[in-house]
Image (tube, rainbow, N blue to C red):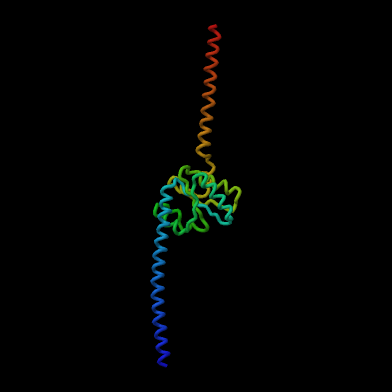
Amino acid sequence: MVYAIDNIKAFLEESRRIITYMVKEVHIYMRKAIELKSQVVSEIVEKLEKSSSAIVVDYKGLTVEEVTELRKKMREAGVEYKVYKNTLVRKAAKEVGIEQFNDELLVGTNAIAFGYEDPVAPARILKEFMDSHPKMQLKMGVVEGEFYNESQIVEFANIPSREVLLAKLLGSLKAPMSNFAYLIDALIKKQEGQEA
């Protein structure tokens, strides 16, 4: 009987030691998890502040190959495509003053496309990709510090790229200049013909 009581006491002491150790380990793990989450929030804050646009898209239903294809197109255009936990995005957005990235709008399987040089590029690439992948859906975004809903982001996506706009501008300037040059040349030739 005494032997059984001693075994029970030893068992309880060992259990207490194990539980104390596990509680310490859980606290260490939780501290590390909180540190990692705060680092991710800081990363998102930095990207939101640095980028000229951040477009949120629901990628639910896409295959790994389709997402890889989209990431490739984004990279080629200088756009960064990232998936973060919604809670961390909400915290980061709140830090930078984007109140619309809230519990009501930022739900589901979301990714963010960050545009750095061309603010319209993420929306344009996403819309083009959506044309062949209808499972994907634009949700909202921030362009140059202003919040826009889904329909407004689609309107942005229809704006041609900077290069296309410049080419159109140069083309429209070239025609009148060419006509003017032809006119001057014709006048010079006419005047030379009269002098001869």
Asked which quadrant contains residue 175, the reply is top right
Task: Tell me what residue is drawn at x 50 percent, y 34 percent.
Answer: 166
- Residue furthest bottom as drawn: 1
Question: Residue 141 versus residue 47: which sits nearer the camera?
Answer: 47
Percent across and percent down for residue 62 are 58, 55
Whether residue 135 can be seen here:
yes
Q: Quadrant of the N terminus?
A: bottom left
Res 93 visible = no
Left or right position of 170 against 93: right
Q: Is residue 52 left or right of residue 155?
A: left
Rendered view: 127 above or below 21: above
Q: Is residue 170 left or right of residue 38?
A: right
Q: Nearer the viewer, residue 192 or 91?
A: 192
Indicate the quadrant containing the C terminus: top left, top right, bottom left or bottom right: top right
**Residue sticking out furthest to the top:** 196
Q: Which residue is located at x 49 percent, y 45 percent?
A: 78
- Image location (x, y in percent) of residue 117: 46, 43
Of the pair 74 and 193, the residue shown nearer to us: 74
Q: Residue furthest right?
A: 132
Residue in the image at 42% along x and 86% along y: 8
Q: Quadrant of residue 102?
A: bottom left
What residue is shown at x 52% (from left), y 27% (from top)?
174
Q: How many marks?
A: 0
Identify whether 138 is placed above or below 177: below
Q: Choose top left, top right, bottom left or bottom right for residue 190.
A: top right
Q: Position of residue 81 (x, y in %)?
A: 50, 51
Residue 182 lies, in percent from the top left, at 54, 19
